[in-house]
Image: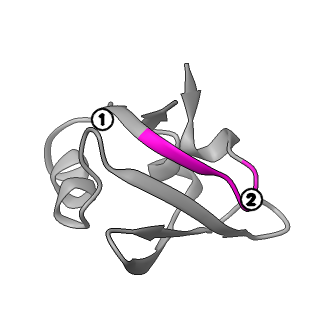
Amino acid sequence: MKTLRDIKCGEKVRVVKLTGEGPVKRRIMDMGITKGVEIFVRKVAPLGDPVEVTVRGYELSLRKADAEMIQVE
């Protein structure tokens, strides 16, 4: 299964599952990233951290570790 970290700049994906537990998972969900939502990858920093995405019409930066917890298709 691919994660958000594996997606290249300019691609649009849909969230399949959030891994992670407790407060970390809750924080990701509070940012609007839930199962079924579309995510557009705007930019990826040269070393892969952070990843800038567009979710539900707003821009968001995610750390590499958080992006690995988001499984996409």
Q: Tell me whether the residue at label 2 lies in contact with that at label 1, contact meaning CB atoms closer than 8 angstroms.
A: no
- Neighbour tally class for label 1: few under 14, some 14-19, many 20 plus, Cα within 10 Å: some
Please provide percent x and percent y for residue 17. 32, 30
26, above or below 63, in the image:
above
Q: Check the image and name the residue furthest to the right.
A: 46
Q: Could you tell whether 59 is left or right of 16 in the image?
A: right
Inspect the image, locate mark 2, and give the three-letter code of the amino acid beneath it.
Gly
Upstream in sequence: badge 2 or badge 1: 1
- Its colouring scheme is one colour
Q: Residues within 10 Å of mark 2 (few under 14, many from 20)?
A: few
Residue 9 sits above or below residue 71 on the image: below
Give the quarter of the figure containing the N terminus: top right
Indicate the position of residue 15 as horizontal and vertical percent values.
Answer: 38, 39
The residue range painted magenta reads 8-14
Question: Between 43 and 20, which is closer to the camera in this rendering?
Answer: 43
* Label 1 secondary element: loop
Residue at image x 21%, y 36%? 21
Instruction: Name the secondary structure under disc 2.
Output: loop
Rendered view: 67 above or below 46: above
On screen, residue 69 versus residue 52, left or right, reads left
Check residue 3 in the rendering and tell me which mark sits there, or answer none.
Answer: none
Find residue 16 and report its horizontal and vertical position in percent. 36, 30
What amino acid type should be assigned to the residue bearing mark 1? Gly
The residue at 21%/60% (across/down) is 27
The residue depicted at 85 percent of the width and 68 percent of the height is 46
5 or 9, which is in the foreground? 9
Residue 25 at x, y = what percent? Answer: 23, 46
Q: CA distance from mark 2 to mark 1?
A: 20 Å
- Quadrant for residue 4, please give it: top right
- Disc 2 designates what residue? 48
Mark number, residue 20: 1
From this viewpoint, is residue 50 visible? no
